Amino acid sequence: MKVLLFANTDWYLWNFRRSLALALRDAGFEVLLLSPPGEYGAKLRELDLRWEAVPMDRRSLNPLDEAAVLAHLVRLFRREKPDLVHGFTIKCAVYGSLAARLAGVPARVNAVTGLGYVFTSDDAKARALRPLVRLLLKAALGGMDARLVLQNPDDVAMFERARLVARERIRLIPGSGVDCDRFAPDPECTAPAPGRPLRVLLPARLLWDKGLAEFVEAARQLRAQGRALEFLLAGTPDPGNPASVPEATVRGWVDEGLVRWLGHVGDMPALFRTADVVVLPSYREGLPKGLIEAAACALPLVTTDVPGCREVVCDGENGLLVPVRDAQALAAAIARLQDDPALARRLGDAARQRALAEFDERIVIERTLAVYRELVGRDGSR
């Protein structure tokens, strides 16, 4: 059975779907990974995975360019003759599904990981694009030979209300999974030594809708209170996303002494072992992998009460939920964990147990394979 995995960046394939690709390969599947060109394509090839670059610009709206991308995909699919195409994110789901239909691919699976800029932004461009994107989603994702994979119940409800896809063809799978053996608590980890600042980490792409403004404002408020805290940012701007925070703005926060910017971090388990609290004041998520990785490391979590985030954190059980776009509430939650180390430890232990029970990558991969088996037999038959 031949499976094509198609994403809008090679970084996404590396960070979120590498384990799936390796599991498919090790199980005897033929796997081809597709994305626009980037530095992670070579890393995927080093793992003996097939990866091919697609000439697609995530931000392009030029009709001629987009038609050329679709034509390229149709030719590629006809050449490769896959049994199933699995697309990730809205643009790849739409283009991959339309090309698969035109090329006669037997089965299509699409994972819409969050609703993306078009649905989360209130700017005029995003609002103007929504009707067209809804129309394209309905045309591309429907059909008996397709399944739509969503990551949280709010997104399922949204698709049901919009009548984009029949409910019986939607599957709920919580994220891309986390290696809970690699992301694990440090057995020698102890509470911060007296006098050491509490380390508060935000691991995410540097986008405004990840709550960067609220994170920095919370740092400013807590600093004014004279608290000993260190705010860490792990991630880089994403120029392909309209919500990207300019690097100059981030460096301004650093110069102001509000945050320490770590940039891209290759060894996230090691970084989590140096943190005391992990926060994600996001405006909306599919299912935030950074939070799940932190949970697997038994760290207390602070996040917003929004779709995706509240599927990871139950308030008072394995973390704290705060209202969205509320820097004061975020600051108060962080201060609460600093003042109550026993609560922080209890929340962190519970976060680890939930990660093991619900978000381990082995669970997610098996559920994904079950979706494949619904559409195509193990030998490629339908």
Image (spheres, helix red, strand yellow):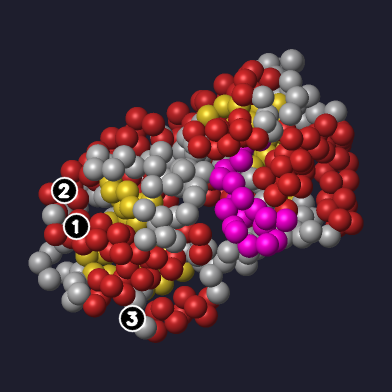
Magenta range is 110-128
Q: Which residue is mark 2?
A: 343
Is 136 placed left or right of 33 in the picture? right
The kind of secondary structure element at disc 1 is helix
Q: Which residue is mark 1?
A: 336
User: Which is more toward the observer, 60 or 127?
Assistant: 127
Q: Residue at x 86, y 33 (%)?
A: 103
Q: Residue visible at 77% across and 41% down?
A: 136
Residue 257 circle label: 3
Look at 41% across and 38% down and name the residue there.
Answer: 311
Q: Residues within 10 Å of mark 2 (few under 14, many from 20)?
A: some
Quadrant in which the C terminus is drawn = top right
In space, the residues marked 3 and 2 are separated at their CA atoms by 28 Å
Q: Position of residue 364 (x, y in %)?
A: 49, 31
In the image, 198 versus 120, the foreground residue is: 120
Instruction: Indicate the quadrant where residue 244 lies.
Output: bottom right
Q: Amino acid at mark 3?
A: Gly
Closer to the camera in the image, 363 or 216: 216
Report the amino acid beneath label 2. Answer: Leu
What's the residue type where badge 1 is placed? Arg
* N-term-proximal mark, 1 vs 2: 1
Horizontal placement of 26 versus 181: left or right?
right
